[in-house]
């Protein structure tokens, strides 16, 4: 594919042969979609158009024209996309401070970069796949491998993506916003805070027929379902990401036929949650969790 996931679950272009018209066209088209998202958020009713998984920070910065140069900067960009429970050894200070023998890496590394999916090996220097890394050139290898992964392998995709964004909204967003602000504008935040929940409730239109059930819903999201907020959001809206600018966010709770044994329904195109007239908070909680879990397993939400 054209995209892969970082350990933290962000999107980054898959390294591939440069100079491909197809690759450039795909990334430019993606950039246009992300540009459309920025334009949509600026027009009435300013309903944020979130695009799901976030882009990797180093790719967003590449789209903005920022490329890390120093080894410290390269390691920082690598570590920004690593899971704390399984960090990449290339981002550790120990790799630069200790010998390869002490690290158990003696004779294990070469100046070749293995592409994902057994797509081949890229020589980081001429004949690199046959040159073994030793302590004397370890920093050179680390700089070369991180430079290829975080800069060279994505530069063409970043340029095409940037052109696509500019096709729709110009370059102002790329210049005026930070990488973090752009990521949030495109994909929102990965959690729903207490303040976000207040905005969610304030921007919810509730049918009089399910006023009590809607009250229970938000009480549960403040309490028993606190950890399920993002899952409930995805069930009802199609995205588990909360918009960074939620002024245009709208949500609807409507009634539906059913009993305490019935599951709620959702219409993600309208940010609508449909609830039976449950007779108690516990019934609402149990049926909502069942529906959320069912749709997550079936990839329906």
Image: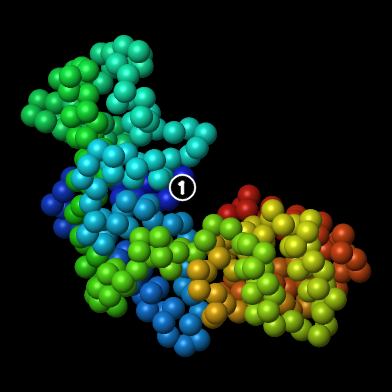
Q: Is residue 282 above or below residue 203?
A: above
The C terminus - image quarter: bottom right
Horizontal placement of 200 versus 284: left or right? Answer: left
Q: Is residue 193 left or right of residue 75?
A: right
Q: Residue at x 31, y 53 (%)?
A: 59
Chosen colour scheme: rainbow
Give the percent coordinates (x, y) of residue 43: 42, 85
Residue 48: image x %, image y %? Answer: 49, 75
Give the image location of residue 289, x and y in percent: 75, 56
Q: Nearer the viewer, residue 8 or 238?
A: 8
Q: Residue at x 26, y 62 (%)?
A: 64
Residue 165 coordinates in the image, percent (x, y): 28, 70
Is residue 258 visible to us here?
no
Is residue 192 visible in the rendered structure shown here? yes
Within 10 Å of the Cα at label 1, are there few (<14), some (14-19), or many (20+) other Cα atoms? Answer: some
Residue in front for this viewpoint, 44 or 237: 44
Please tell me in which quadrant of the rendered image residue 106 appears.
top left
Q: Which residue is mark 1?
A: 9
- Comparing 190 with 67, the one in front is 67
- Describe residue 13's horizontal placement relative to residue 293 as left or right: left
Q: Residue furthest front?
A: 97
Q: Please identify the residue farthest to the left as the structure is shown.
A: 126
Residue 206 vs residue 56, the one in the foreground: 56
Up-down relation of residue 63 to residue 68 (above or below): below
């Amino acid at each position: 594919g054209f995209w892969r996931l970082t350990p933290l679950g962000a999107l980054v272009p898959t390294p591939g042969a440069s100079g491909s018209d197809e690759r450039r066209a795909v990334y430019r088209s993606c950039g246009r979609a992300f540009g459309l998202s920025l334009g949509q958020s600026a027009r009435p009713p300013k309903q944020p158009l979130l695009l799901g998984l976030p882009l990797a920070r180093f790719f967003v910065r590449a789209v903005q024209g920022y490329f890390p140069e120093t080894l410290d900067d390269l390691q920082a960009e690598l570590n920004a996309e690593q899971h704390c429970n399984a960090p990449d050894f290339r981002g550790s200070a120990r790799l630069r401070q200790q010998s390869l023998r002490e690290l158990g890496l003696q004779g294990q590394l070469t100046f070749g970069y293995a592409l994902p999916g057994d797509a081949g090996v890229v020589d980081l220097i001429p004949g690199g796949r046959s040159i073994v890394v030793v302590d004397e050139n370890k920093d050179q290898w680390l700089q070369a491998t991180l430079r290829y992964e975080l800069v060279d392998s994505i530069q063409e995709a970043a340029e095409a993506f940037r052109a696509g964004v500019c096709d729709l909204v110009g370059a102002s967003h790329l210049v005026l916003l930070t990488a973090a602000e752009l990521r949030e504008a495109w994909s929102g935040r990965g959690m729903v805070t207490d303040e976000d929940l207040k905005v969610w409730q304030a921007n919810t239109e509730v049918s009089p027929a399910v006023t009590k059930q809607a009250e229970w819903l938000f009480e549960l999201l403040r309490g028993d379902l606190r950890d399920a907020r993002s899952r409930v959001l995805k069930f009802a809206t199609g995205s588990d990401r909360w918009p960074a600018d939620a002024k245009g966010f709208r949500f609807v709770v409507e009634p539906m036929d059913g009993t305490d044994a019935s599951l709620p329904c959702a219409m993600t195109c309208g940010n609508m949650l449909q609830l039976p007239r449950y007779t108690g908070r516990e019934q609402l909680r149990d049926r909502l969790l069942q529906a959320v879990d069912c749709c997550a397993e079936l990839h329906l939400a």
